[in-house]
Image (tube, coloured by chain):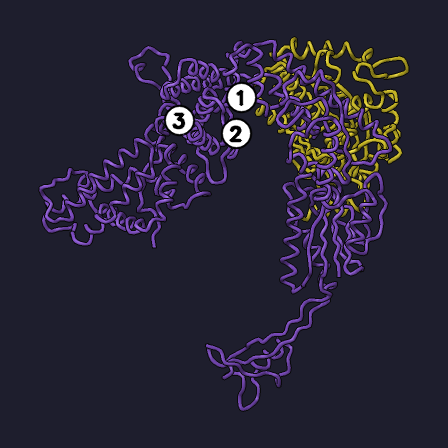
Amino acid sequence: MQLIFEIGCEELPARFCEPALAQIEAAFAARAEELRLEYGSLRTVATPRRLTLLVDGLAEKQRDIQEERTGPPAQIAFKDGEPTKAALGFARGQGVDPADLYTVETDKGAYLAANVFEAGQPTAELLPALLLEIIQKLNFPKSMRWAARRERFARPVRWILAVAGGEVVPLSFAGVTSSNLTHGHRFAAPDAFEVKDIAGYIADLKAAHVVVDPAERRATIVAELQKLADAAGGVLVADPGLVDEVTFLIEEPHAIAIKFGDAYLELPDEVLISSMRSHQRYFSLATHEGGPLISTCCVIYNTPVTSTKEVYEGNLRVLRARLDDARFFWEKDLKTTLEARLEKLQDVVWLHKLGSMFDRSMRMAALAGDISWALDFDEDIERCAEVGALLSKVDLLTDMVGEFPDLQGVMGREYALADGEEPAVAQAIYEQYLPGGADDALPASDVGALVALAEKLDALVGCFGIGLIPTSTSDPYALRRAALGVIRILQEREYSISLSDLFAMAISAYDVVPDDDSETSALMQTPLETDAKVLIEQLLDFASTRLKYQLAGDFPTDVVDAVLAANRDDVLSVRERVEALANLRSEPDFEPLAAGFKRVVNILKKQADEDAELAVDESLFAQDEESQLYAAYLEGQKSVETAVQAHDWQAACQALIRLKSPVDAFFDHVMVMAEDAGLRNNRVALLGQLRDLFMQVADISKIQVG
Amino acid sequence: MLFQDIILTLQKFWADQGCVLQQPWDVEKGAGTYNQATFLRALGPEPWKVAYAEPCRRPSDGRYGENPNRLGAYFQFQVLLKPSPDNVLDLYWDSLYAIGIDKMEHDLRLVEDDWEQPTLGAWGLGWEVWIDGMEATQFTYFQQVGGVELDIVPAEITYGLERIAMFLQGVDSVYDLEWAPGVSYGQIRHQEEVEFSKFHFDQANTDLHFGWFDQFEAEATRLLEQGLILPGYDYTMKAGHAFNILDARGAISVTERQKYIRRIRTLAQMSARGFLAQRKELGYPLLAPEDAAKLLAEESAD
């Protein structure tokens, strides 16, 4: 039989619907399994006004139970041929005649058993409690009460449709009793009508102007938008998130295009898109993909109105008012240059203890300059990066960014261009925030990359430096994104500079020359509370974890760990080393080599560090295998050095692989822990050199073998 | 429809639904919610149905009379229905029909918007109502008011009268609205917008207002402690308005702002608690006598 269960309520927040459906589906599936209720298929659909469960092929009753159940041990079951209390109790509990009891052998001995048959209850008797529980257990991000009711739901519940096999399933929640009635579109077809089966439910709702299946609604929205875009001679600016949201703002999709007038196109596209999207949920159109906007946008609305005139004019008026506001802000903001506003950033606090946005901008400028110098960029780049960094936060003071906070960076760029700043400077002000997410675009210019690095490094160092370190559940300053951003920029733009150098530069940017003239004025002060060395270590740990996750998708974790253990500072080489090492793994000699290296590491662990640092004395070699290993080591050292210089990590790994035989031979024949201290120390020293050689590539003791 | 007729029509509509038509409360405030007919009546077990037009002052929103859409002061039409009726949304759509908005000719939508007012310690869940993309009404089921979790949840409907009027009359500037036959909104209010914007943004004496805030706060506290809830709440509103003026003048820093909000909220919470205690003492006069007796018995058992 079919089950149709619909919770009808006042308009749910769009983002609540799909998670609620997932809960309903999971709850029913779990409970049906517990209750031995079989069904053919299960599906959920929703609109803002209804959450619906549709079950097809639901069994009319529970699956019968036919099974053997064991009871007390056989030896206490009968006395003098008669069943004992224990046996009788068991029989009674299982609902069988004592005469039907028998014995079974288990590994624990002989036990009394009964063959139990429980006829399944009719499904209809189980559904009321089951469905009620589903409603009661629904969890929403925010829930409310209404009137004098104590129950909570996302919005007031107004009707419950619960029909199984054509019959009403009786239940009630918050004073609403179930029936076989549903309601159509709130305005176009509000009257109640009967529902008997799933096909009827879907079809009759459609006739009542409700497209109850979200997938179908979404597809219709996309198709309608496409049609309008074609008619307007443009393309839809892709916005799947908005499509998803709008799908749950309506019960029946209708679309209309609004022409707002070319005059507004003088505003930057991002401003137009923000004005249209953020509050109004309008879809923007462009001339072609990636091209500029055209002065037509699309609106998805709900009611099959008698004439679209009012919808058109109403929306146009609202849109014009918003665009007029945006234009008002734009023109007002343009009256003052970014540079003229810069000082006012002293009044904007960035983080308590770390000073104002002005201070931050100054640090970013110094840092961008330092990084530029370290990477050997020319003066123009250095200058543009410094100016870009200095002006990077000024747009926070503008009315436009005040109204549209996510336009920060975008407005900075636009206003910089309008001020006559160099295009590279303007572009950098925009690029400082890139990448936005793990897969997002990176700065496309060196100037932009420098400012972006400075922006992120300043935040990482500042926050960690005053103890604002992200936890597994909380990262309010988006430091993970910042660290990953730094890594990706270095990788993509192939900037050869170590993380520790970058962190050190960012730390010294925080040094402040104190005002007073006392003796201590020679010492710099800093708002950072953590010692620089410790801070760099913390940041390297943090960054290498990000690096690890970045690579973990494509490479085995132990290979990634091995490389990071050897050097996590040189971001550029990490991926290359990981690739090379992953390839090396497939070679037959690799595992023995790794095993051998593990032995090296284990032995060295037990030695004092200094012993491993001693120079090797060839004159102390007593066995051939020692001198052979040493010769191989020297050879390997040269090869690895050459390879590392050429960034040829494959070659470096090959050089290491060639050490497999001498290492094996060494361990097979030489006893490292010789009685003689001279011999022993020399052997330890040799192993130490070997380890250092390997560690130029990776700590392959971390590779899982066998 | 004339601006004044919209108000008349809404009043008649809601009066026909059994609402008491109260008048605006004559102390400056930013929203109809602050009128004690909403803020205080929302509290406690007694039912209440009320409707009224309320002038609202929002100093920071002033635009010197130059912006056709934004005003430093405007009118709300406020309705409170406690407990929230099951057909409350249908009543609302019917009220729109009464002022000429046909639900099959316009796109009427409920879009999630959970209202909160930190100075009142109040919040609720509900929606903005959109008419063809324009936000026209705030619809809220209050969950907490004055820091008190509500036992009986009311529905609050707040119409943005100027918005709706501009929509109905099809004008692009609020000042072009026809208020009464041959009399425009601008003729009545434009000068007020100009002068009050100058006052709020340029001229308000911040020293005086800082001083007044402290005095209003002290007086509110004193009165509320004496059990004079309505006068105490009056001074709470005055403190709130003083804060709004200081805020518009840019005299309140980011860190200070939270402190001021907390101070006003404290007064609002005191008013709320005081009101609840007072209603209990009065024996919940708006409840049917049997219900009141039952409730009082339960409460003394707790």
Q: Gap in Å between the C-alphas at discs 1 and 3? A: 20 Å
Give the secondary structure at mark 1. helix
Give the secondary structure at mark 2. loop
Visual hue assigned to chain A: purple
Identify which residue is drawn at 31% across, 38% down: A651
For the residues bearing labels 1 and 3, Cβ distance under 8 angstroms: no
- Could you tell me which chain the residue with mark 3 belongs to? A
Query: Going from the N terminus, do you reach mark 3 or mark 2 first?
Result: 2
Q: Gap in Å between the C-alphas at discs 1 and 2? A: 12 Å
B134 w.r.t. A568: above or below: above
Q: Is residue A237 left or right of residue A546?
A: right
Q: Which amino acid type is marked by label 3?
A: Tyr
Residue B202 occupies which quadrant of the picture?
top right
Residue B35 occupies which quadrant of the picture?
top right
Are tags 1 and 3 found on a single chain? yes
Quadrant of the image containing the C terminus of chain A = bottom left
Q: Which mark is residue A441?
A: 2
Q: Is residue B250 left or right of residue B52?
A: left
- Could you tell me which chain the residue with mark 2 belongs to? A
Identify which residue is drawn at 54% across, 81% down: A112
Q: Which amino acid type is marked by label 2?
A: Ala
Residue A275 visible in the picture: yes
Quadrant of the image containing the N terminus of chain A = bottom right
Q: Which mark is residue B216?
A: none
Query: Going from the N terminus, do you reach mark 1 or mark 3 first?
Result: 1
A90 w.r.t. B6: above or below: below
* Residue in front for this viewpoint, B118 or A670: A670
Q: Gap in Å between the C-alphas at discs 3 and 2? A: 17 Å
Residue B174 occupies which quadrant of the picture?
top right
Give the secondary structure at mark 3. loop
- Residue hosting label 3: A495
- Residue hosting label 1: A430
